[in-house]
Amino acid sequence: MSTSTPTLPAGRPPQRVVIAIDGTIATEHALAYAKRIVPSNASVQIVSVAENPRTLVPLGSQTMAFLEAARDELLRDATDSLSRAKSEMKRDDITIDTEVIDLSRHGGDVVHALIESTEARQAELLIVGARQHHGLRRWIEGTVSGPLAKLVRCPLLIVPEGFSSVAEHLPRRMLFAVDGSSPARHALQVGMQFSRPDTELRAIYVLDPAVSFGDFVPVETLEGALVSEGKHVLQEATAVLDGIAGHSQSQLVHTDRTDADVSHVIVREAIKWNADMIVMGTHGRRGTAGWMVGSVAGRVARITKTPVLLVNPPRA
């Protein structure tokens, strides 16, 4: 099993894609998005995890016969979901395989089962659906996508339940949240591998004085420094974007002085601009522009109405 971070040659879209499903409307939307973003000649593995019924009910509360029946039902559901997903994803220019991971036999939890699957295939992209629904089959939501974002080595694309698009090809508009850090620059490069010649690109830098110096520095001095740094970061970002697309947009965006934090500003800007993908790193700076940290990326993933591509820093 590979222990290195999968890397993509410059400009090449991902060719090894894993899609995690659980048979809900959230994963239906994720599949629809995946069908429009997966490139030609890609190898797609659709994975469904059947949970261990012992972890879903208190020990001793049910008989062994019930637990076996529950396991059989979970496996049937997972198999049926894979069959439907494969049919929905069918394209003549890609290959599709399926896999059921039975946690009753495999052991462990959903998160680590998916990570092992992506590493075994040396996946270059993992796609999951996200929802706020809670129930027996509740695993592709914050309780899974959050830990996945921290632990998975390849880029993670989270498609929220409410997102849908009739576009033939995606993404049409990509929003890059940048902060000038090395991880953010890496996310920028990785995100560009998902763009198409006609994709519109936009970089934003969120100014949030509240998380930088607080009351220790005069507001005018602080904002002047942040604006100057933000402009420099956006110049670097647009140079990268223009080098591939020929033209891009960029904007300095302020958090509200009332209640809008960095995460909500990113989500808001994506909605206002009608973006169909947000790209951001999961780690970033902790200095004068220290907003792009894991808590921000994780919060964006939980509240976003737009698919978000989370990119971890490369690891040796």
Image (cartoon, grey):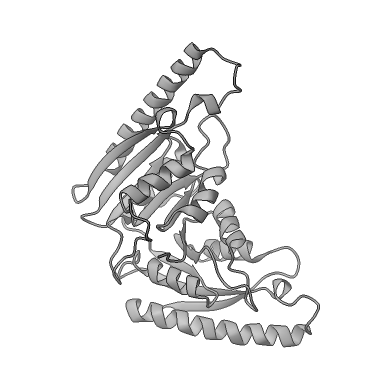
Q: Nearer the viewer, residue 57 or 210?
A: 57
Report the residue that reaches farthest toward the right. Answer: 215
From where the camera sits, is residue 247 visible?
no
Farthest residue to the left: give it: 92
Residue 289 relative to residue 90: left or right: right
Q: Residue 13 sits in which quadrant?
A: bottom left
Depth check: give the residue in front, 277 or 41. 41
Looking at the image, residue 57 lies above or below residue 234: above
Is residue 307 visible in the rendered structure shown here? yes
**Residue shown at 52%/76% (left/top)?**
181
Looking at the picture, how far across and down is residue 134, in whole percent? 58, 35
Quick one: 270 or 94, which is closer to the camera? Answer: 94
Q: Residue at x 80, y 80 (%)?
A: 216
Percent across and percent down for residue 11 are: 29, 70
Q: Position of residue 4 (x, y in %)?
A: 37, 60
Horizontal relation, residue 227 to residue 189: left or right: right
Q: Residue at x 45, y 53 (%)?
A: 152
263 to the left or right of 16: right
Residue 173 against residue 19 in the figure, above or below: below
Q: Is residue 242 left or right of residue 220?
A: left
Residue situated in front as seen by the camera: 268 or 297: 297
- Counting the numbered discs, the total is 0
Q: Quadrant of residue 179?
A: bottom right
Q: Residue at left 34%, top 64%?
A: 7
Q: Quadrant of the C terminus?
A: bottom left
Position of residue 117 relative to residue 316, above or below, is above
